[in-house]
Amino acid sequence: MTDQPILRDVTQDDLPIFFEHQQDPGARHMVAFTSRDPNDSEAFMSHWARILADDTITKRTILLDGQVAGNILSFQWDGKLEIGYWLGREYWGKGLATRALTHFLEIVTTRPLYAQAARDNTGSIRVLEKCGFTITGYVRSFANARNEEIEEAILILN
């Protein structure tokens, strides 16, 4: 057993596992910003089909000991390059997100790079800060997973 994650290209076989990760209510609450209906597998697969077809998006599956642990990607949002990631709950609190993001930042070298996280998602904010991101401010946004407006941290890596 190794504690080093491997990042590889996303495959169709990964998608059911990503969808399963999204079914965790606690994870959805922490991420806060999900699709309108995170239980809609058809919409999820359609969304990922668009991601996989878009060469401007860098997308990787995070593997740990040969198991799909999550995903990480970079994409254009409002004219800025942003990153996002999602780990299955069983992989939380083990430093995997920090190690995977560190490796991903060697692949995606464009700066500045942006990230957003619910203000109360201290674990994700801590991961981003360990990787060099700094909080530049906060905005209020509607979070589908919480069905309410929440405060979101805006972070940047220069």
Image (spheres, helix red, strand yellow):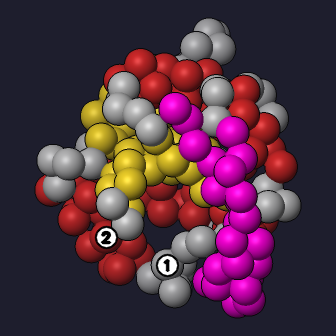
Report whether residue 43 is seen.
yes
Location of residue 35 with respect to 56 vertically, above or below:
below
Q: Residues within 10 Å of mark 1 (few under 14, many from 20)?
A: some
Which residue occupies the foreground of this view, 124 or 71? 124
Mark found first going from the N terminus, 2 or 1: 1
Q: CA distance from mark 2 to mark 1?
A: 9 Å
Location of residue 66 with respect to 79 vertically, above or below:
above
Q: Which residue is mark 1?
A: 35
Span shown in magenta: 134-158
Q: Which residue is drawn at the image coordinates 76% and 72% (left, top)?
A: 151
Magenta part, dominant SS: strand
Picture coordinates of residue 137, whole percent (x, y):
71, 58
Is residue 98 on the magenta stretch?
Answer: no
Q: Farthest residue to the top: give it.
A: 2
Picture coordinates of residue 118, whole percent (x, y):
73, 63
Asked if labels 1 and 2 touch by Cβ distance under 8 angstroms, the answer is yes
Which residue occupies the foreground of this view, 111 or 57? 111
Q: Which residue is mark 2?
A: 47
Picture coordinates of residue 26, whole percent (x, y):
78, 65
Q: Residues within 10 Å of mark 2 (few under 14, many from 20)?
A: few
Location of residue 51 with respect to 55 vertically, above or below:
below
Quadrant into which the N terminus falls: top right
Amino acid type indicated by mark 1: Ser
Amino acid type indicated by mark 2: His
For residue 92, side relative to residue 39 (left or right): right
Report whether residue 143 is seen.
no
Mark 1: which secondary structure? loop
For residue 94, side relative to residue 40 (left or right): right
